[in-house]
């Protein structure tokens, strides 16, 4: 059952018949880390060094908008398997001209492209993950490439038990191979693995492959004024305001 604002917080001790997952897998970009804040700040710093003014919040959203389109090209076979760092660079080279950053040379573009490796965690993320891992294995299930996720974890202090990247499967979410592959690596049945994400489309794909689902609200994912996506009542197993709220609902002390 999904909780709502009007419903009391549920926990496994108060709802003994609720299925308990054996492991938690987390989407990362937007769910665990603040891509908009991190990218827009690094772009603003880079632009300042070059004397360029602009709307760096818009730049971050423009860059991010190319991400699903580029992955779809891989998923359709228009591109061979290409990891996210390379896709991010392709998108960056396509958007810099629209934001006055065509002046950036190779070294600066490389540095800016690696802003995705240095994204800051949401304020609740480290404490929430640390608490959740008392009762559950916690892993990424991200389209980010392996080296990106390792750098991000080290930079932001993310306490993962494991890092699972789409790169391990040669498939991007929402391909079934990613969700089922994560369950296989953790040696749990799909129904024993719960995906935690702030993107309903990711959760719906996970649910269609038998996973449990937890939707976590991130009202500032795209910066101030972000409009949260529509989620139907009861659509996901859990709905939480942040990771600490999710831990409350899962009965983690």
Image (tube, grey):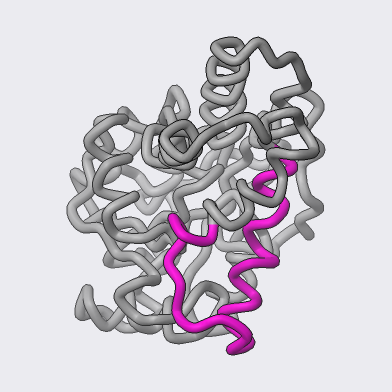
Could you say which quadrant of the image residue 121 lies in?
A: top left
Describe residue 49's horizontal placement relative to residue 139 as left or right.
Answer: right
Q: Is residue 101 above or below residue 168?
A: above
- Closer to the camera, 105 or 150? 105
- Closer to the camera, 7 or 216? 216
Q: Residue at x 25, y 58 (%)?
A: 163
- Does the magenta run of residues contain 210? no
Q: Is residue 224 above or below residue 241?
A: above
Describe residue 141's horizontal placement relative to residue 235 as left or right.
Answer: left
Q: Is residue 101 above or below residue 28?
A: above
Q: Residue at x 65, y 10 (%)?
A: 51
Instruction: Give coordinates of residue 101: x percent, y percent.
Output: 67, 30
Magenta-drawn stretch, dominant element (helix, strand or loop): helix
Q: Is residue 132 above or below residue 222?
A: below
Instruction: Give coordinates of residue 89: x percent, y percent.
Output: 53, 52
- Does the magenta run of residues contain 78? yes
Q: Residue at x 70, y 24 (%)?
A: 56
- Closer to the camera, 199 or 172? 172
Q: Quadrant of the N terminus?
A: bottom right
Could you say which quadrant of the image residue 4 lies in?
A: top right
Describe residue 176's horizontal placement relative to residue 5 as left or right.
Answer: left
The part of the chain drawn in magenta is 61-87
Residue 244 at least partly seen:
no
Q: Residue at x 22, y 77 (%)?
A: 185
Instruction: Give coordinates of residue 219: x percent, y percent.
Output: 69, 32
């Amino acid at each position: 059952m999904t909780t709502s604002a009007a419903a009391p917080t549920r926990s496994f001790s108060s709802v003994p018949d609720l299925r308990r997952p054996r492991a938690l897998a987390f989407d990362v970009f937007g769910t665990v880390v603040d891509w908009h804040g991190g990218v827009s700040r690094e772009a603003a710093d880079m632009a300042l060094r070059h004397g360029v003014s602009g709307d760096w919040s818009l730049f971050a959203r423009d860059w991010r908008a190319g991400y699903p389109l580029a992955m779809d090209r891989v998923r359709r076979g228009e591109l061979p398997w290409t990891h996210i760092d390379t896709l991010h660079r392709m998108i960056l080279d396509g958007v810099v001209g629209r934001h006055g950053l065509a002046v950036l040379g190779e070294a600066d573009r490389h540095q800016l492209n690696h802003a995705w490796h240095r994204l800051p965690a949401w304020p609740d993320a480290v404490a929430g993950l640390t608490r959740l891992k008392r009762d559950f294995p916690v892993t990424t299930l991200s389209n980010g490439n392996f080296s990106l996720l390792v750098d991000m974890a080290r930079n932001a202090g993310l306490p993962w038990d494991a890092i699972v990247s789409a790169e391990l499967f040669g498939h991007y979410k929402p391909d079934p191979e990613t969700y089922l592959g994560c369950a296989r690596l953790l040696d749990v049945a799909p129904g024993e693995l719960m995906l935690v994400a702030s993107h309903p489309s990711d959760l719906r794909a996970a649910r269609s492959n038998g996973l449990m689902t937890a939707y976590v609200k991130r009202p500032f994912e795209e910066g101030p004024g972000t409009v949260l996506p529509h989620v139907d009542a009861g659509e996901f197993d859990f709905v939480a305001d942040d990771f600490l709220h999710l831990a409350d609902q899962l009965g983690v002390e």
